Amino acid sequence: MVKADGLAAGKGVFVCSTTEEALAAVERIMVREEFGRSAGRQVVIEKRLDGEELSIQALVAGRTIVPLATTQDHKAGPGRRQGAEHRRHGRLLPGAAGHAGGCCARWTPRSWCRRCMR
Protein backbone atom coordinates (compact mmCIF):
# COMPACT_ATOMS: atom_id res chain seq x y z
CA MET A 1 0.00 0.00 0.00
CA VAL A 2 1.31 3.46 -0.89
CA LYS A 3 -0.04 6.56 0.89
CA ALA A 4 0.61 10.27 0.53
CA ASP A 5 1.97 11.35 3.92
CA GLY A 6 0.23 14.73 3.89
CA LEU A 7 -3.41 15.81 3.64
CA ALA A 8 -4.85 14.42 0.41
CA ALA A 9 -8.61 14.82 0.94
CA GLY A 10 -8.93 11.08 1.57
CA LYS A 11 -7.73 10.23 -1.93
CA GLY A 12 -3.98 9.62 -1.54
CA VAL A 13 -4.05 5.87 -0.85
CA PHE A 14 -3.22 3.16 -3.37
CA VAL A 15 -3.73 -0.54 -2.66
CA CYS A 16 -1.18 -2.12 -5.00
CA SER A 17 -0.86 -5.74 -6.10
CA THR A 18 2.46 -5.41 -7.95
CA THR A 19 5.72 -3.47 -7.76
CA GLU A 20 4.76 -1.71 -11.00
CA GLU A 21 1.49 -0.47 -9.48
CA ALA A 22 3.38 0.79 -6.41
CA LEU A 23 5.89 2.65 -8.56
CA ALA A 24 3.05 4.22 -10.58
CA ALA A 25 1.40 5.33 -7.31
CA VAL A 26 4.65 6.94 -6.11
CA GLU A 27 4.94 8.79 -9.42
CA ARG A 28 1.36 10.10 -9.16
CA ILE A 29 1.89 11.25 -5.58
CA MET A 30 5.46 12.61 -5.69
CA VAL A 31 6.22 13.52 -9.30
CA ARG A 32 2.85 14.61 -10.70
CA GLU A 33 1.76 15.99 -7.29
CA GLU A 34 -1.84 14.91 -8.00
CA PHE A 35 -2.78 15.40 -4.35
CA GLY A 36 -0.95 18.68 -3.85
CA ARG A 37 2.65 19.66 -3.28
CA SER A 38 2.67 19.21 0.50
CA ALA A 39 0.78 15.88 0.43
CA GLY A 40 3.34 14.45 -1.97
CA ARG A 41 6.59 15.36 -0.24
CA GLN A 42 6.74 12.00 1.51
CA VAL A 43 5.00 8.67 1.07
CA VAL A 44 4.27 5.86 3.49
CA ILE A 45 4.72 2.35 2.15
CA GLU A 46 3.02 -0.47 4.05
CA LYS A 47 2.71 -4.19 3.51
CA ARG A 48 -0.60 -5.07 1.94
CA LEU A 49 -2.81 -7.11 4.25
CA ASP A 50 -5.95 -8.79 2.97
CA GLY A 51 -8.90 -9.56 5.20
CA GLU A 52 -11.21 -7.85 7.64
CA GLU A 53 -10.36 -4.50 9.24
CA LEU A 54 -11.59 -3.40 12.65
CA SER A 55 -11.32 -0.16 14.61
CA ILE A 56 -11.68 -0.09 18.37
CA GLN A 57 -11.83 3.43 19.80
CA ALA A 58 -12.33 4.81 23.29
CA LEU A 59 -12.77 8.11 25.12
CA VAL A 60 -9.98 8.63 27.64
CA ALA A 61 -9.75 11.11 30.54
CA GLY A 62 -6.91 10.45 32.95
CA ARG A 63 -7.32 6.83 34.08
CA THR A 64 -10.95 6.58 32.91
CA ILE A 65 -11.49 4.70 29.65
CA VAL A 66 -14.91 4.46 27.99
CA PRO A 67 -14.94 2.13 24.96
CA LEU A 68 -17.04 3.08 21.96
CA ALA A 69 -18.74 0.71 19.55
CA THR A 70 -16.44 -1.11 17.15
CA THR A 71 -16.41 0.11 13.55
CA GLN A 72 -15.38 -1.36 10.24
CA ASP A 73 -14.25 0.19 6.96
CA HIS A 74 -15.14 -1.97 3.96
CA LYS A 75 -12.12 -1.87 1.66
CA ALA A 76 -11.85 -2.74 -2.00
CA GLY A 77 -11.61 -6.48 -2.40
CA PRO A 78 -12.23 -9.25 -4.92
CA GLY A 79 -14.75 -8.01 -7.47
CA ARG A 80 -14.48 -4.39 -6.27
CA ARG A 81 -11.80 -2.27 -7.85
CA GLN A 82 -10.10 0.72 -6.26
CA GLY A 83 -11.58 3.99 -7.46
CA ALA A 84 -14.80 2.34 -8.64
CA GLU A 85 -17.77 4.61 -9.05
CA HIS A 86 -20.79 4.02 -6.87
CA ARG A 87 -24.23 5.56 -6.37
CA ARG A 88 -25.63 7.35 -3.35
CA HIS A 89 -29.17 8.75 -3.38
CA GLY A 90 -29.31 8.21 -7.14
CA ARG A 91 -26.20 10.32 -7.84
CA LEU A 92 -22.98 8.87 -9.23
CA LEU A 93 -20.04 9.55 -6.91
CA PRO A 94 -16.34 8.90 -7.42
CA GLY A 95 -14.99 6.19 -5.13
CA ALA A 96 -11.79 5.87 -3.17
CA ALA A 97 -9.97 2.84 -1.80
CA GLY A 98 -12.68 2.30 0.82
CA HIS A 99 -16.25 1.73 -0.28
CA ALA A 100 -18.23 2.13 2.92
CA GLY A 101 -17.98 2.07 6.66
CA GLY A 102 -20.20 0.95 9.43
CA CYS A 103 -20.82 0.70 13.13
CA CYS A 104 -21.16 -1.70 14.90
CA ALA A 105 -18.86 -4.47 13.69
CA ARG A 106 -20.96 -7.15 15.40
CA TRP A 107 -18.60 -9.98 14.42
CA THR A 108 -15.94 -8.65 16.81
CA PRO A 109 -14.97 -11.28 19.40
CA ARG A 110 -15.45 -9.92 22.95
CA SER A 111 -11.99 -11.26 23.81
CA TRP A 112 -10.46 -8.75 21.34
CA CYS A 113 -12.25 -5.85 23.04
CA ARG A 114 -11.20 -7.05 26.51
CA ARG A 115 -7.59 -7.37 25.32
CA CYS A 116 -7.60 -3.81 23.94
CA MET A 117 -9.05 -2.44 27.16
CA ARG A 118 -6.22 -4.00 29.19
Image: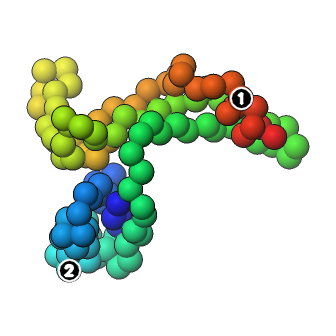
Nearer-the-camera pick, 27 or 92: 27
Quadrant location of residue 74? top left
What's the coloring here?
Answer: rainbow
Q: Disc 1 marks which amino acid?
A: Ser
User: Residue drawn 47% across and 39% down?
Assistant: 53
Residue 8 makes an appearance in the image: no
Q: Disc 2 marks which amino acid?
A: Val
* In front: label 1 or label 2: 1
User: Residue drawn 38% across and 56% down?
Assistant: 48
Q: Report the Cα–Cα distance between label 1 and label 2.
A: 45 Å
Circle 2 sits on which residue? 31
Residue 79 makes an appearance in the image: yes
Q: How many marks?
A: 2
Q: Position of residue 17 (x, y in %)?
A: 25, 57
User: Residue drawn 42% across and 63% down?
Assistant: 46
Instruction: Examine the rendered structure and indicate whether residue 56 appears above or below residue 31.
Output: above
49 lies left or right of 56: left
Packing grade of label 1 (10 A; few <14, some 14-19, many >=20) is few
- Say what secondary structure mark 2 lies in: helix
Circle 1 sits on which residue? 111
Q: Position of residue 102 (x, y in %)?
A: 44, 26
User: Residue drawn 37% across and 72% down?
Assistant: 43
Quadrant location of residue 47? bottom left
Packing grade of label 2 (10 A; few <14, some 14-19, many >=20) is few
Looking at marks 1 and 2 on the same chain, the residue that comes earlier in the sequence is marked by 2
Quick one: quadrant of the C terminus?
A: top right
Quick one: quadrant of the N terminus?
A: bottom left
Quadrant location of residue 98? top left
